[in-house]
Image (cartoon, rainbow, N blue to C red):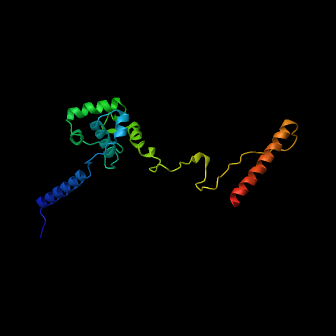
Amino acid sequence: MSVSPSDFGTQAARLHRRFFLKILDMKKRTTLIDEQARKELDITRDEYALCSFVHYRAADPRQKKPGWCCDEREDIAEFVGITRAGLFKMITRMEGKNLIEVDTQTRAIRVTSAFVDAENKVQPRKQSLHGRVNKVDMARKQSLHGRVNKVDITNKVYKGDIKGEQGEIVSAAETSLQRLDRWISEISTG
């Protein structure tokens, strides 16, 4: 069985069509709208959908310009559910709010850190879902064990030519440290 030049063209067209359909499958189909972030940014749901789509597509390594959304404006408008003219107006508004930037040479778009920061702030706000959980101040490095407290001792005792009040302060500090050591040993054994 021999392959003619016309068969080769047909096979290339089929491969191209399969590749194109796979690319279409990788387009974003849905957007989860973070209402709290949307309200903080003071934008509509359509504007949030635009920013979310641009953020998603800019992460695709196959874009013509890495880190930027280079999709056709018709495709973006179709996803958001607006006209192409409406999309241009929306992009201009988002530029004004410093949520989207447009590359003047390629007309590619991407979201700014203002959108990314607003979208990411929402998750870390919840510390605990349990109402009765004690929240530990991590700066103090307290123990999670009920009967043990870690004490950071930063007192330094200087000995030498100390006279008068300074000598009394050193003596009081030494006494406090001895009491603290005794208290720690009582807690540890008890």
Q: How many marks?
A: 0
Quadrant in the rendering for residue 32: top left
Res 54 visible: yes
In the depicted view, which residue is nearer to us: 157 or 13?
157
Quadrant in the rendering for residue 104: top left
The x, y position of residue 88, in whole percent, is 25, 32
Task: Tell me if 122 is positioned left or right of 23 in this view.
Answer: right
Residue 2 lies, with reference to residue 175, above or below; the image says below
The x, y position of residue 41, in whole percent, is 36, 34
The x, y position of residue 85, in whole percent, is 21, 32
Residue 88 lies, with reference to residue 179, above or below; the image says above
The x, y position of residue 75, in whole percent, is 22, 42
Q: Residue at x 20, y 55 (%)?
A: 16
In the depicted view, which residue is nearer to us: 124 or 168?
168
Res 99 visible: no
Viewport quadrant of the N terminus: bottom left
